[in-house]
């Protein structure tokens, strides 16, 4: 029986290269790869060897006999990507071309790279660089814990997605890798410090800001952003004390991308189910007391332009009550009559089968609402609701609500000493090489904008590393001043509380132990607790420091 890719596909393409018969597409060299919502296994060509299962970092692939009932729609979804054929295909020897890893060709000393940020783009870049000998990578992260949005952005009920951290933990064990956690670039060390001590500095700092919705009332108590809410749910220390009031029956989320779905799902999931995840304790307690009965996800365009992806829609409707009101059911039918794109048709078919909003709810539920252009937040001292105009007309629709969250996308933040494009919110770059800033590179959302999935950062980081190594080989990068020991001393003098790989391992182990038998981990949400756990880590031996070139 063939294997099937399911909801948590991260699109990093590892499965493509593991497959001996090249039956997983689109592959990273194919045009559709950058925009695909997931990858698909050809059931006719699959030889059922399971190599893709071992290669997948997020556990997204199973034999079709081992799928859970809610995953069954993915059988058809994988098959539908390929033309219909009869019988089994003969095995092929034409494999997906492996994108060539850049070779460091200069033999006069190691290539030293500083990476700023420790999310997926940073860790994929570190991994790509350390595939060969003669490279040293220092990763700088302002929090004492690494992995960026995987830890603080992926919803806690998507634990399989969070498994990609095992891959990143593997990278931290590679020779040449050093973590400088709890060290803020721009505060403890400057861009110039980093340039002086490395051949290159690669920024993979993501897009930490939210796009702001410029309508009246957006600063009233009871308004917020979905990304802040996700950070609060995930126990990010800067958001642990966010005032989240769930004492009202309705929440309105503006925008209908995957982040909106994440927030709506968590707000309507049975807290007993969430209690088996790594959700922050404060969020779980608030959700147990929550009065929320309905989350309305309001989009300004119609159903065919929904921003959420098909795999996420399939996952959501399999586990949650999702409804549409009558006018929106009519919009779905109208779009279905006109739509020819197979992927969009698939989404519309699912929407057309959703329940009716008039039916009394048996449990907390989600309602999709379309053609709702945000007009203003209602209320005087705090939020009482949201007013929308019907897109393309003058009619006004109001929805009473106690919480209004915008989920209209992330935005990059300017980095001191680097150019910044205010329009697009990215650092101007050519294939990752920052324009007008020699020795400086970018990867991930600060390079290409806030789109794609965790694994999309693998090919994005590989492209940047390719440019960086090429520049090093061509002698275009300035040699670092001093030895690694000098940088290490400088950082320790400015931030005595830095956390290294051993410190992170100690935090990780303490959180997993706190989680007990029922939860993957119970996260620390205060920096002081993280540092106390890190302090229990064994100090590096004299031999280890000497081997790392860090002196005594
Ligand atoms: P997104 O997918 O870009 O969706 C943004 C939404 O905001 C769209 O519905 C957009 O509508 C709407 N919007 C933008 N400006 C607006 C305005 N002024 N007024 C009203 N609506 C407005 O953003 P996201 O949900 O933050 O996701 C970011 C990326 O992370 C995406 O690539 C997403 O797939 C990814 N992600 C993936 C997962 C997952 O795979 N599980 C989870 C979370 C995030 P228009 O379309 O009309 O512009």
Image (cartoon, rainbow, N blue to C red):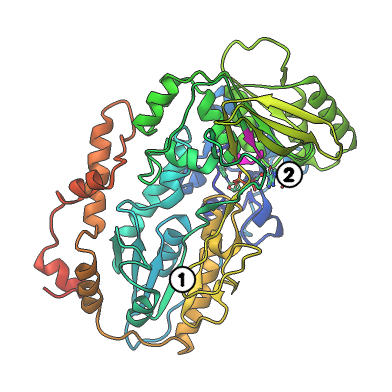
Whether 464 is among the magenta residues is no
Mark 1 crowdedness (10 Å alpha carbons): few <14, some 14-19, many ≥20 = few
| Mark before the other along the chain sequence, 1 or 2 | 2
- Percent position of residue 470, x then y: 50, 81
**In this rendering, does residue 415 appear at all?**
yes
How many numbered markers are drawn? 2
Residue contact between numbered discs 1 and 2, judged by CB atoms under 8 Å: no
SS at mark 2? loop
- Vertical relation: 418 (above or below) 139: below
In the rendered image, the residue lying farthest to the front is 380
Task: Please state the horizontal and vertical placement of residue 10, each as a whole percent of the image.
Answer: 54, 47
Report if residue 345 is visible in the image: no
Nearest the eye: 119 or 372: 372
Q: Which residue is mark 1?
A: 416
Crowding around mark 2 (Cα neighbors within 10 Å: few <14, some 14 to 19, many 20+) is some
Residue located at (43% from left, 55% from top): 119
In this rendering, the answer to whether 231 lies above or below 167 is above
Q: Which residue is mark 2?
A: 82
Q: Nearer the viewer, mark 1 or mark 2?
A: 1
Q: Which residues are magenta?
A: 253-258
Residue 387 horizontal/vertical position (percent): 71, 32
Say which quadrant the C terminus sits in. bottom left
């Amino acid at each position: 029986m063939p294997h099937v890719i399911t909801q948590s596909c991260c699109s990093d393409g590892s499965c493509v290269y593991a497959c001996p018969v090249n039956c997983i597409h689109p592959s990273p060299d194919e045009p559709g790869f950058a925009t695909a919502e997931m990858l698909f296994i050809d059931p006719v060509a699959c030889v059922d060897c399971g190599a893709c299962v071992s290669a997948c970092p997020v556990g997204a692939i199973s034999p079709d006999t081992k799928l859970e009932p809610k995953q069954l729609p993915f059988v058809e979804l994988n098959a539908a990507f390929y033309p219909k054929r009869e019988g089994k295909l003969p095995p092929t020897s034409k494999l997906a071309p492996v994108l060539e890893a850049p070779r460091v060709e200069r033999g006069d000393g190691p290539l030293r790279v500083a990476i700023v940020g420790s999310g997926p783009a940073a860790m994929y870049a570190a991994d790509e660089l350390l595939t060969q000998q003669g490279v040293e990578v220092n990763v700088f992260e302002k929090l004492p814990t690494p992995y960026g949005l995987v830890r603080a952005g992926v919803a806690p009920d998507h634990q399989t997605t969070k498994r990609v951290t095992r891959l990143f933990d593997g990278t931290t064990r590679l020779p040449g890798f050093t973590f400088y956690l709890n060290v803020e670039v721009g505060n403890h060390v400057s861009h110039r410090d980093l340039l002086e001590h490395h051949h290159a500095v690669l920024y993979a700092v993501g897009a930490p800001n939210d796009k702001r919705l410029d309508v009246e009332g957006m600063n009233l108590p009871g308004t917020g952003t979905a990304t802040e809410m996700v950070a609060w749910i995930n126990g990010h220390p800067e958001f642990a004390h966010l005032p989240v009031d769930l004492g009202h029956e309705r929440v309105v989320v503006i925008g209908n991308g995957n982040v909106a779905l994440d927030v709506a799902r968590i707000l309507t999931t049975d807290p007993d189910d969430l209690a088996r995840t790594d959700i922050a304790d404060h969020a779980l307690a608030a959700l147990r007391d929550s009065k929320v009965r309905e989350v309305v996800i309001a989009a300004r365009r119609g159903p065919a332009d929904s921003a959420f992806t098909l795999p996420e829609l399939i996952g959501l409707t399999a586990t949650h009550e999702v409804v549409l009101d009558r006018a929106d059911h009519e919009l779905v039918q109208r779009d279905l009559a006109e739509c020819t794109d197979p992927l969009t048709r698939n989404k519309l078919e699912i929407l057309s089968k959703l329940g009716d909003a008039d039916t009394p709810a048996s449990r907390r539920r989600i309602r999709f609402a379309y053609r709702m252009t945000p007009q203003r937040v209602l209320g005087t001292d705090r939020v009482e609701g949201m007013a929308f105009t019907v897109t393309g007309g003058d009619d006004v629709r109001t929805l009473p609500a106690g919480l209004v969250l915008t989920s209209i996308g992330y935005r990059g933040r300017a980095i001191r000493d680097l150019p910044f494009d205010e329009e697009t919110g990215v650092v101007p770059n050519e294939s990752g090489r920052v324009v007008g800033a020699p020795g400086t590179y970018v990867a991930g959302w600060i390079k290409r904008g806030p789109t794609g999935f965790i694994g999309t950062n693998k090919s994005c980081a590989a492209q940047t590393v390719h440019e960086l190594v090429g520049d090093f080989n061509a002698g275009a990068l300035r040699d670092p001043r001093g030895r690694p020991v000098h940088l290490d001393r400088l950082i320790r003098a400015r931030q005595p509380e830095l956390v290294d790989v051993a410190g992170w391992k100690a935090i990780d182990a303490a959180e997993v132990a706190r989680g007990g038998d029922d939860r993957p981990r119970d996260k620390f949400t205060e920096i002081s607790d993280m540092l106390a756990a890190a302090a229990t880590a064994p100090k590096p031996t004299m031999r280890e420091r000497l081997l790392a070139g860090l002196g005594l």
